[in-house]
Image (spheres, rainbow, N blue to C red):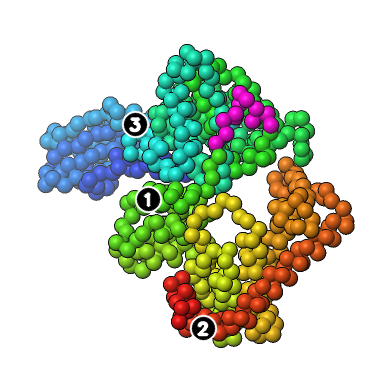
Amino acid sequence: MSKIILKNFLIFLLIFLVIAALFSTYNAKTEKPAEIGLEKLISQIENQEVKEIIVKNSNLEITLLNGQKEITKKESTDSLSTLLKNYNVDPAKIKQVKIDVKEDEGWSFWAVTILPILIPFIIIAAFIYLMMRQVQGANTKAMSFGQSQARELKQKGKDKITFKNVAGCKESKEELLEVVEFLQNPKKFLQLGAKIPKGVLLMGAPGTGKTLLAKAVAGEANVPFFSISGSEFVEMFVGVGASRVRDLFKRAKKSSPCIIFIDEIDAVGRQRGAGVGGSHDERKQTLNQILVEMDGMETKINVIVMAATNRPDILDPALLRPGRFDRRIVLDMPDIKDREEILKVHAENKPFSTDVDLRKVAERTPGFSGADLANVLNEGAIMAARRNKKSIEQLDILESIEKVLLGPERKSHILSEKERKITAFHEAGHALVAHELPNVDPVQKISIISRGHAAGYTLKLPLEDKHLHPRSEFIDELAVFLGGFVAEKEIFGEVTTGASNDLQQATKLAKSLITQYGMDDTLGARTFGEREELIFLGKEIHEQRDYSEKTSEMIDHQISALITQAQKTAKDILLKNKVQLEKIVSVLLEKETLERGDFEALFTK
């Protein structure tokens, strides 16, 4: 409030200074006349030096024969003739002087007479007016507090997003074509008694293109697109969220046909009856209002509600029943072909050199989402710009992949010679075990240059996308995890903290083999433990045990057995191929990085 008062005070001060400047300009004379006394005026009249006298109230403006101007004052009660008579001036000499009497008139009279009185009232009135506007603005905001904050997107021209701008996810686009056709030609469906789903739920991992796909549907159908986040409904005041939901659907019905898109709907759509909050909880009221509005939409009203979430498991069942979000579209991580198409979309308007092969980039990015791929090309462009290049090269893109995966190179993080040697043996241990085992992805790159928190890294990438993983693959992967640990122990006689992350990953994988995948012969084909979630906190914090203490001991025993066997496998490989291990370490210490071709060449010599 103090800032508003200060702002208004400064405005009033500025207005006052402008008015004062105008007055000073009006009153200023271009040539200021000399001020004289009455005795000198009488003397000049006696000497016949005066040409003209202009009388303005008590002011006498005098013009001499030589053109010089003077000014003097007289008593306001006496006239000029009385004054001259009292000074015994010769009447004959008075007749030779032109005497003109003028009174103030017109706008100048009113400006000089009335404005000094009006200005204070004008300033006070302006102050009151501005303060009233502030109060009215606050009242307007209070009245609009329950209005929807949804942004209406009208796509036109080059900014229009269609399915051409969405690479991959062919099945998802085919599902949504029905929605587009309904928005464009609803009679085709209604005359056959068909009812298009009112709600479409887009489910997928972050970055898979849920929001982009929703915008593409609106662009294809050429209809308005109302976009809002689930968190924008919820406020600290109970009832505001429900009011905003009502206002949003009211706006949408007026703009029918259109699309309402609610991003991150799990912010208000979580399961009811869990966590804290009574029957008047704001989130519950908002969810209830969404359910009511979706039920209340008539078939003839062409309003499609689309929502996106990466946590469909925590949504309230009432949202997912038929008549609401009964059309569910899953967006998976793109496969290699989709990744190549996505890269081509994001490669537009980027200058690439002739050596860039987006297919190879797609091969190196398994498990990357569309947002990750866009980030890879963006980081590649930034890297090329920092190196003062005119175009983006393949090397820039490949380095950006490692930056996205592991973080930027930490060239300032200089290791001692002993630490470099330990890191080289550690990474060589991973790479050698991975090379010798048949069910492990090929090694693409080995490096002892620090990235992120890692002193070095071994990058393994599959030749093709995998959706099913057999037990043999996991067993071999356990041995690879422990390859660095075993190499340190065998060469230096002790291990360092650099193997801590490998041990965590190995333990987690071994536990998953037993408790989730049922891949242990001793414990049998079943799962162990049921994960429960407190909806209020929004994350898994408790695992319900559905097995006995004896079974728990068996699980611990089998996890240790798997890790012990993996450690033995890694040890046998490293001892058998110690010469190859030394070769890999020698090259790493010299070059610091080893690409797949050079790594494979070490085994052919």
Query: In terms of sequence position, does the residue under pointer 2 or pointer 1 come before the other?
Result: 1
Q: Is residue 444 magenta?
A: no
Residue type of the residue flagged with mark 3: Ala
Q: Residues within 10 Å of mark 1 (few under 14, many from 20)?
A: some
Which mark's residue is nearer the viewer, 2 or 1? 2
Q: In this figure, which residue is indicated by the disc labeled 1?
A: 344
Q: Residue at x 51, y 66 (%)?
A: 442
Q: Relative to 294, is 235 above or below?
A: below
The location of residue 328, given as percent across then percent down, is 57, 34
Label 2, residues with CA under 10 Å away: few <14, some 14-19, many ≥20: some
Residue at figure coordinates x 58%, y 63% from the top left? 439
What range of the chain is rendered magenta? 317-329
Q: Looking at numbered disc 1 in the image, what kind of residue is underneath it? A: Lys
In this picture, is 331 found above or below 401?
above
| Residue highlighted by disc 2 | 583
The answer for how far apart the CA atoms under marks 2 and 1 are is 40 Å
Give the residue drawn at x 70%, y 45%. 538
Q: Earlier in the sequence, mark 3 or mark 2?
A: 3
Q: Which mark is residue 384?
A: none
| Residue 517, position as x, y percentages in the image | 70, 52
Quarter holding the C terminus is: bottom left
Which label belongs to residue 111?
3
Question: Which structural element holds mark 3?
Answer: helix
Q: Are marks 2 and 1 in contact (CB under 8 Å)?
A: no
SS label for mark 2: helix
Where does the image place residue 541, in percent across and percent down from the top left? 75, 50
